[in-house]
Amino acid sequence: MSEADDRARKVKARRQKRKLKAAASVAIAVTAGLFLACQRGVTEVQKAIDAARGDDADAQTSDATSDPAITVKDASASATDASQALDAGRPDAALARRSSNAKDAAVDVNEHRKGMPVRDNLLE
Amino acid sequence: MPKRVLFVVKELEGAEPLGPLYVAGALMQAGHTCAFIGTRGNDVMAAIKRWAPDIVAFGATTGLHRFYLGLAARIKEELPHVVTLFGGPHPTFFPEAIFSPGIDVICRGEGEDAAVELANALDRGDDHTLIADLWVKHEGKVTQNGPRELRRDLDEIPFPPRELLYAYDDRLRQRPLKSFTTNRGCPFPCSYCFNPSLTEHYGSSWKKVRIRSPENVVREIAETRKNGPLQVIGFRESIFVYREDWLRAFGELYRKEIKLPYYCHLRADIVTDEMVELLAWSGCHTVNVGIETANPRLANEVLQRQIKMDKLERGIRALKKAGIVVFADNILGIPGGTFEDDLATLQLNIDLDVDYAAATLCTPYPGTGIAKYAVENGFFSGDFDLIDDSYYTESVLTFADPKDKRRTENLHKFFAVTCALPELLPVVMRLIDLPTNDFYYAMFRAWYLVCHMTDVMPRRPDLRQLKEGLLSIFGVFEGKEENWFPMPPPEELPIVAGKTKESAEAAPTTGGTLIRLGKRAAAPALGIGGEHV
């Protein structure tokens, strides 16, 4: 088989696979759309209940979507320590973000509506 | 004593912030200390206080500028001694951002040399107001300096110090995809892009593309690979290659030392058959080309692309024939166009068998030709604060029929997946009449993720990366953005002339010109540039 034929075969196979993957994406999107609609539903019902009770709706509903409180690291970590850590090529304790923690994950509809998956952001 | 410079980057989780990293590299070479922090899931004010910087630097695109201007104001309120430096596309093309109360210095254009001069001047206690490329607020007035000569030899610029990102979050090291650039500048005048505005700032020297040597590019990639996993490379300059001899020399080195699939940007109308063969031979897996619109009038009169559609189509077909994945950029909702034009653009992508048909909603960034056109023809108010930080949400332009606006915005969400699966088109034509909802966004995200992971930038994500990606389709993210502070209204300050490009000397003070920066300050009218490809 010539190189041109081989390339043509690859392009054709890729097209077929792309269709299958696109169909799978539609299924994922339908599931995600339903999930997000239910999330919104829960929030709106909670708001309505809070409004009926006369509570502060914003304060109550934010619990449904927000993260646990941000852990503020020890403010006593000195600037000198930080620069020494950087110089040594180690992670900078004064700057390092919170470690990965499943509890930190939460629905953020605003972020979702900005478009692409955050860590795969190549187009911006 | 060397200065401590902290770079605050919103969306650090995305592609590497190469601009700020280059600036940090130059500062470190000059002996200053730099660090980076992200904002999501991070208490930025607490982190700034802990690290105790002398300078806090931000690089902003329009849309994100609101976040940074609010944060800068808070920083100056709590830490008045800290100098805030604002660079990147937004202040480059809208330098009036200096009148925002939190900003001390704005940098226009390439920032490496200006930032070093600023840090050195602050370090020595010298006058820091007369530095080319900077507008400086000091003692109640703003000094406005002209542009500097561009560095012609890019090989002299230090490699971006990516270790600063990894020091903040080691997960950034683990990303299998990393970004690089091989050149700066662009000779084309496209009205939706930042390049013509940089030509306005730097003069015609911006059009003369400055290209790194293949040896220098390959050495940077090899060094990056030593410090973390690397499976696919993204070249992110406007146009990856102009000359076949450069590509041949690059390919020989790249195949020998790197041998990884890469992604790059090209104009399909300028690729030759030989170039296409060299791209495939050197390891190019995906080429990002701009189709933008199927309507030649919009392409050449409104978007100013100077393009022949038959050449564009021929180039894309040649890339496909060579087995290269084609990722096409398209713009929907172009002022002066119609919804039928957008459908024709979709059909052209389908006909060309594009692998991923990316679409953005036409956005009039400050200083771009498209912003000028939109304002002059009544499609846009000129209020750049209305621009969102993503061009994937809603259009800021005025449509003759509000129904068309909704249909265009919805078509945008379905554009890529419909190109991959044209059988969806009859359903999509019905769905786009409904109000925009989370399913539409989920569709956009799902296909983006699946197609990128498997076709555009094929890689083997680890379980955590895969989980993160999938959860993001469901709107689930780790860490919340809790650093939004209100953007204060601009101050009224006198401006004085500083260095001009011609003399490179301080010009005499013009005295007392008062600029009012209102929301309607339209950059095109002031002859100031724009942004974004």
Image: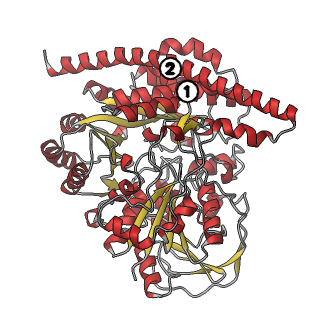
The dot on residue B442 is: 1
What kind of element bears circle 1?
A: helix
Front position in the image: B131 or B232: B232
Residue B13 rendering spot, x and y as whole percentages: 45, 46
**Image check: B469 left or right of B157?**
right
Q: Mark 2 lies on which chain?
A: A
Q: What residue type is labelled 1?
A: Ala
Task: Say few, some or many: other residues with alpha carbon within 10 Å of mark 1 (under 14 / 14 to 19 / 20 or more).
Answer: many
Query: Is the residue B324 above or below the residue B175 in the image?
Result: above
The residue beneath circle 2 is A28
Residue at x 40%, y 73% (from the top left corner): A80
Residue B119 image position (x, y, % from top left): 44, 77
Task: Name the disc covering residue B112, or none.
Answer: none
| Residue type beneath disc 2 | Ile
- Relative to B108, is B180 on the left or the right? left
Residue B404 visible in the current orientation = no
Which residue is found at the position 33% from the left and 57% from the top? B163
Looking at the picture, do discs 1 and 2 lie on one chain? no
Question: Gap between marks 1 and 2, in whole Å?
Answer: 8 Å
**Does the residue at mark 1 contact the one at mark 2 (Cβ under 8 Å)?**
yes
Residue at left offset 63%, top offset 31%: B409
